[in-house]
């Protein structure tokens, strides 16, 4: 499994998390046989499942997974995929969306390779970030095409 991570510094990480949540739910809800192409002519990602809390989320794609976590002053992204092409495609999609929604704040997404020897270390760091007590364990319902 190949892994890449990015920490996006911003004063409004929750706002961007919410915008990514709304976008992924919209993409997930598109009719599977008539997806809308992106502006560059590529097909949108095939999303299998999305799950969200008030401070994080996971987007499961056919090609891999993107995990997001909003901290006090940053939004942390983690992308996992089985091969380099899939990893780079997911990175491009997430980077493009972040640059589009963060245009006013000139958000910068800089990816780094995560520790491949310990794939759960970064995930555990994301999951163990301090959350306000009232938000721990609160999940929104999962959206899945498989459930249809």
Image (spheres, grey):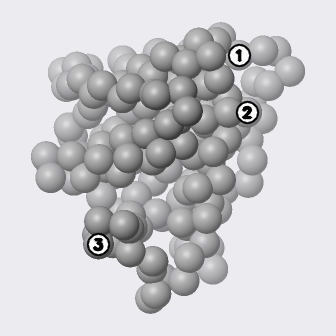
* Residue with the mark numbered 2: 54
Q: How far apart are the two marked residues, 1 and 3, measured between alpha carbons? A: 39 Å
- Provide the residue designation for mark 3: 41
Q: Circle 1 sits on which residue?
A: 131
- Provide residue 97's location: percent of width, then percent of height: 45, 47
Q: Earlier in the sequence, mark 2 or mark 3?
A: 3
| Residue 39 is at least partly visible in this image | yes
Q: CA distance from mark 2 to mark 3?
A: 33 Å
Disc 1 is placed on an element classified as loop
Residue closer to the observer: 12 or 27:
12
Q: Residues within 10 Å of mark 2 (few under 14, many from 20)?
A: some
| Image mark for residue 33 | none
> Hey, which residue is sitting farthest bottom in the picture?
33
Determine whether, in the image, residue 110 is placed left or right of residue 128. left
Image location (x, y in percent) of residue 47: 46, 63
Locate the N terminus by quadrant.
top left
Label whose residue precedes the other's in the sequence (2 or 1):
2
Residue located at (76% from left, 24% from top): 136
- State left or right for residue 98 relative to residue 128: left
């Amino acid at each position: 499994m190949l892994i890449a991570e990015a920490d996006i510094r911003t004063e409004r990480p929750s706002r961007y998390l919410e915008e990514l949540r709304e976008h992924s739910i919209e993409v997930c809800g598109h009719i599977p046989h008539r997806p809308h192409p992106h502006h560059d002519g590529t097909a949108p990602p095939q999303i299998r499942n999305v799950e969200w809390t008030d401070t994080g989320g996971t987007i499961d794609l056919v090609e891999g997974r993107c995990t997001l976590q909003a901290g006090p002053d940053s939004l942390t992204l983690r992308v996992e995929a089985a091969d380099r092409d899939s990893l780079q495609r997911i990175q491009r999609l997430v980077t493009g969306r972040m640059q589009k929604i963060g245009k006013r704040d000139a958000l910068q997404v800089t990816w780094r390779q995560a520790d491949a020897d310990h794939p759960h270390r970064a995930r555990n760091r994301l999951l163990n970030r301090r959350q306000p007590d009232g938000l721990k364990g609160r999940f929104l319902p999962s959206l899945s095409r498989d459930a249809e």
